Image (cartoon, rainbow, N blue to C red):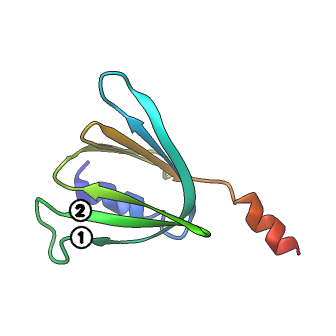
Amino acid sequence: MTFDEALAALLALVGQRVEVHVMDAGESPHLVATFAGTLQAGYSTSGGEPDEGESIFVRIDAGEENASVILDREVYREAIVHPDGAVNLQMGTTELAVMSAPRDPADSSEAAR
């Protein structure tokens, strides 16, 4: 799968609540971090046409907190898109698993008020 195909699969999740699991995929694979929020549109950090050194900055809105994921074309290795739309991306020795997440329970209690 090309970088552009992987990016398109990730951007198909824009507007959805997602969980992101960050794993060290080196010699001793392990979970490094996990966070969740609503996937927002991304933009190119090069500001122009795609090139070999381009990175894409994708924002994740988690209420009062914000997070982001940077997809770097230069270190992209491979990706897998699962039937449910979840995406696993390998960037160098880091693997990102991005999947739809259940609604935030805080959102439900806010709406009930």
Image check: 90 left or right of 68? left
The front one of 28 and 51 is: 28
Please say if 18 is above or below 78.
below
The mark total stands at 2
Question: Residue 31 at x, y = what percent?
Answer: 47, 34
Q: Amino acid at mark 1?
A: Thr
How far separated are the C-alphas under marks 1 and 2? 6 Å
Q: Nearer the viewer, residue 62 or 99?
A: 62
Residue lying furthest front: 64
Residue 37 at x, y = what percent?
57, 61
- Label 1 close to label 2 by CB (< 8 Å): yes
Residue 60 to residue 25: above or below: below
The residue at 41%/37% (across/down) is 23
Residue found farthest to the left: 52
| Camera sees residue 31 | yes
Which residue is denoted by mark 2 in the rendering?
55
Say which residue label 1 marks.
Answer: 45
Q: Which mark is residue 13?
A: none
Say if 64 sits above or below 18 in the image.
below
| For residue 110, side relative to residue 91 (left or right) | right
Quarter of the image with the C terminus is: bottom right
Q: Is 46 situated above or below 99?
A: below
* Residue type at numbered disc 2: Ser
SS at badge 2 = strand
